[in-house]
Image: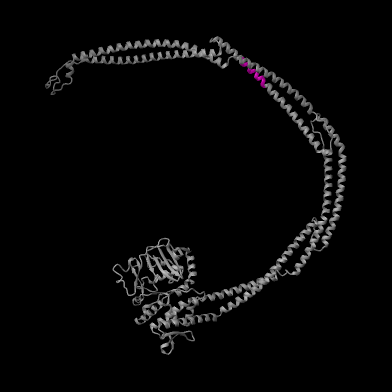
Amino acid sequence: MRPTRLELEGFSSFRDATTVEFADAELFVLSGPTGAGKSSLIDAVVFALYGNVPRYDDRRLIAPIVNQGRNEARVRLTFTIAERTYQATRVVRRTKTGATTKEARLEDVTAGGVVTLAGNADELSAAVGRLLGLSFEQFTRSVVLPQGAFDRFLFAKPAERADLLVQLLDLGVYEAIGKRARLRATQAEARVAELQRRLDGELAEATPQARDQVAARLDTLRQLAVRCEELQPQLDEIVEEGRRRRQEADEAKRSAAVLTDLRQPPGTAELGGQLREATERRTAAEATLAEASAAVESAEQTLEALPAGEDVATLARVLEELAAADARRQELTQAARQAARDAADATTEEARSAQAVSDAREAVEAATRSELAATLAEHLEVGADCPVCHAEVRLLPSHPPAERTDAARAALRTAEQALETARRAQGTAERQAAATDQAVVAHAERLEELAARRDDVAGSLGVAADPAAVTALQQRVRTAQQALTGARGVERQARADARAAAAASDELRSRERAAWTAFDAARDAVAALSPPAVDRNDLVAAWQELLAWAREQVPQASQRAATALQEVERAKARWRELDGRLRAECVGAGVGVELPAGTAPALAVATARERASSRLEVLEDRLARAGQAREELTAAREAQAVAKALGDHLRADGFERWLLNRALRLLVVGASGILRDLSSGAYSLALDDTNQFLVVDHRNADEPRTVRSLSGGERFLASLALALALAEHVADLAAEGAARLESLFLDEGFGTLDADTLDVVAAAIEELGSRGRMVGIVTHVADLAERLPVRFEVRKGPSGSVVRRLSAGETLTDAGPDVEVGTAAATVAAAAPLDEGGAA
C-alpha cells in the first residue's frame, strides 16, 4: 500500500482545507515545531483507512479529531495497491454526545472509472482490512511506528519483551485458540455423553430382532385383514337382508297405523248444504246489483241531457251581479251629480273669499296712509336722524295711536284665513267630483262586461237570459242530481251485499277444496295399498267408501309386519354366528387384536395393523438413528480427543515460549542484516542464553557485548534496525499473516540525538529510500529534516495548521515572498473544500 494524496479539512489542528501530495515522494520528512500537527497527518492517514486514531486508547473515540472551530472533519486518502488506485473517504460530524461518522466510502478509481466497494464506516474498515491484509493493530505496528517504543524493546527485560511481542505479533490468538479447543473438547464430551444416553435410552430397544418380530406380526395382521375382506360381503348381505326386512315390518306397521287412524274430518257432511245456500245468496245479490247499476245509468243519462249544474249556477250568479250592478249604477250617478253641485258651491265660496281678501288689503293700505306719521314716530329716537328728512331728531312728536291700521290688518288676516279654508274645501270638492265621475265610468264598463258574460253563458247553454227561466232550470238540475245520488247509494249497498255473498261463497268453496285436499292426503298416505277409485262429485260418499276399504286392510297389514319381523330375527342369528367365527379367528391369531363389544373385527384388525405398521416405522427410524448416533459418537470421541490434545498443548507455557523464541530469532536475523547496512558492516545483533540482546562488534574481532555499551547513535541504529525488521517481518510472524507493504512512517523522537549520531541516522534514513519503499519521517529536528529530499513543513497559523512542501535545502524564506507561515497560502496545494459527497 502506497499513499499518493491526502486531503483533510476540519481534522484535528487542520481547520481549513489542506492537501498533501505523496505521489513522487519516496523519502520525505514531516517537520515543524512541537505541536504543529505533524503527527495529525499520520493520524489522518490511519483514520481514513480504519476509522480510528492510533494515539487514542479508546477505538470508539472520534470526537477529538474534529477541529474546535468546525462542526465537521473530512479526510480522504488516495492510495495504490499493485496497479489499482483507491480512495477512502470519511466525514465526521459533531453530535450532542460526541461525534458520529456521517459518511464513509471506499472507491476503486483506477483508469478514471469509479466503483464503490464500501458504503459505510464498518464496510470501509472491513474492505481495507481485506485489501491490505492487515488489521488496525497490525497496520499501526508495521506501517506507523510509535515514538520510542522500539528503544524500550531493545533494552527491555526478556519477560517484558515477551509481553510486548505477544502484543505486537498478536500471539494472544493462540491462547484464544487453546480456549476454543478446550471449549470444543468440553462440548464434544457433552455430545458423547448425550449420544451414549440416547443409545442406552430411547434407542436401546431398536434392534433387528424387535424389528423382525413386528414385521412378522404385521404379516399375520395382513392375512387377517384378507380374511375379514373375504367374509365381509356375507356379513354385509345378511345386514342388508335384515335391513330390508326391518323396513318391510316398519312399513307394514305404519300402514296398519295409518289405516287405523283414518278419520273423516268433522263438518264434512254439512259443508255441501252450506255451499248451496251461499251460492243462492250470491246469485240474488248479483241480480240486485245489476238492477241498481241500471238505475244509476238511467239517472246519469237524465242528468247528462240537462245543462251542467255549474254552468247554470254561473248564469244565475251573472244575472244576480248584473241586477246589483244596475242598482249601483243609479246610486253612483246620483252621487256624481251631488259632487258636481258641491264643487260649484265651493268654487263660488272661494271667489267670494278672494274678493274679501282684496277688499281687506285695500282697507289696510288706506289706513296705513292715513296713519303713516304716527307709524314713523313709533321708531324715532332723540339724537337719531329722521328717516324722512335726515335731520337730527331733537323732540319726539305726539300723534294719536294707529287704531284704524290695526283693525284693518286684523280684518285682512281673518279674510286670508277664510280664503285658505275655501280653497281647501274647493280642492276636496273637485277631487270628490272627479272620483265619482271615474266610478261612474268604471261601473259602466263593469255593466258592459257582465252583460257580455250573461249573453255568452246563456248562448252556450241555449237558454234565455231570463231569471225565472234560469231558476226553473236550476231546480230541474238539482232534482236530477239528487236522483243520481240516491241511485248510486243503492248501488253501493247492493255491491257491498254482493261482495259479502261472494266472499262467503268463496270461503265455503275454499273449505270444500281443503276438505278434498285432506281427503287426497289421507288417500295418498295409503296409496301404496291400492285404495279404490272414488266419485269426485260427492265428498261424503268418497269418505265413506275409503273408510270401509281401510277397515278391511288393517288385519292384512298387521300380518305382513309380523312375518317381516320373524325374518329379521333369523338374519340376526346368521350374522351373529358368522361374526363369532371371525372374531374367534382374530383373537386366536395372538397378534394383539383387541375386540371390545361393538367393534367390528375388520376395524379392530385395521387398527392393530396400523399400530404395528407405525411401530415398525418407529423401529426402523430408530434403527437408522441409532446407526447415525453410533457414527456421530465415534466422530465426537475423535473430535474430543483432538480438541483435548490441542487444548492441552496450547495450555502449556512451552508453546508460547517456543513461538516467542522463534519470532525473536527471526527478528534478530533480520535486524542484524539491517544494522550491518546502517552501520556499514560494523555491527550486528545476537541473543545470549537468557534472550538478552547482544551487539556483535565486527570491527573488534566480532566481539559480542551488551547493547547498553552502545553510544547514543549506535543505540538508535540498533533500535531502528529492530523496528524495521519487525515492520518487515510482522506479517510473517503474526498469527494471521499480512500483505507486503510499500510504505513506512517513523514517528521517532530524533530530538535527543547529538549531531554526530544525527548524521549517522540521517545517512541510514537516506539509505532506506533506496529500498523501494516509501519512507516518511516525523521530526521537529531541522538538521535531519533538511537532509531529506522532500520536506513537508507543518506550522501553526491563526486559523489552524498549514503545510508547505519544500525541496532539499529550501527554506520558507526561499519559497518566495508570497509564502506566509500560518496562512492558507502555505498549504501544499490550493485545495478546495471537500463537498458533502467528499469530492474536491
Residue 482 shown in magenta: yes
Q: Position of residue 189 (x, y in %)?
A: 63, 74
Q: Nearer the viewer, residue 17 or 323?
A: 17
Residue 151 at least partly seen: no
Residue 259 shown in magenta: no
User: Looking at the rendering, which quadrant does residue 762 occupy?
Assistant: bottom left
Q: Is residue 509 left or right of residue 666?
A: right
Q: Residue at x 32, y 14 (%)?
A: 422
Q: Against 408, is 782 above or below?
A: below
Q: Quadrant of the N terminus?
A: bottom left
Q: What secondary structure do most residues of the magenta stretch adopt?
A: helix
Q: Residue at x 63, y 16 (%)?
A: 301
Q: Is residue 774 left or right of residue 373?
A: right
Residue range of the region highlighted in magenta in the rendering: 480-492
User: Looking at the rendering, which quadrant does residue 579 occupy?
Assistant: bottom right
Residue 251 at least partly seen: yes
Q: Residue at x 59, y 12 (%)?
A: 475
Q: Position of residue 469 (x, y in %)?
A: 56, 10
Q: Quadrant of the C terminus?
A: bottom left
Q: Position of residue 257 (x, y in %)?
A: 83, 40
Q: Nearer the viewer, residue 744 or 451?
A: 744
Q: Against 655, is 422 above or below?
A: above
The extreme bottom residue here reads 701
Q: Against 566, is 794 above or below?
A: below
Please state the total of marks drawn on the protein image: 0
Q: Position of residue 434 (x, y in %)?
A: 38, 14
| Scheme of image coloration | one colour
Q: Residue at x 37, y 70 (%)?
A: 37
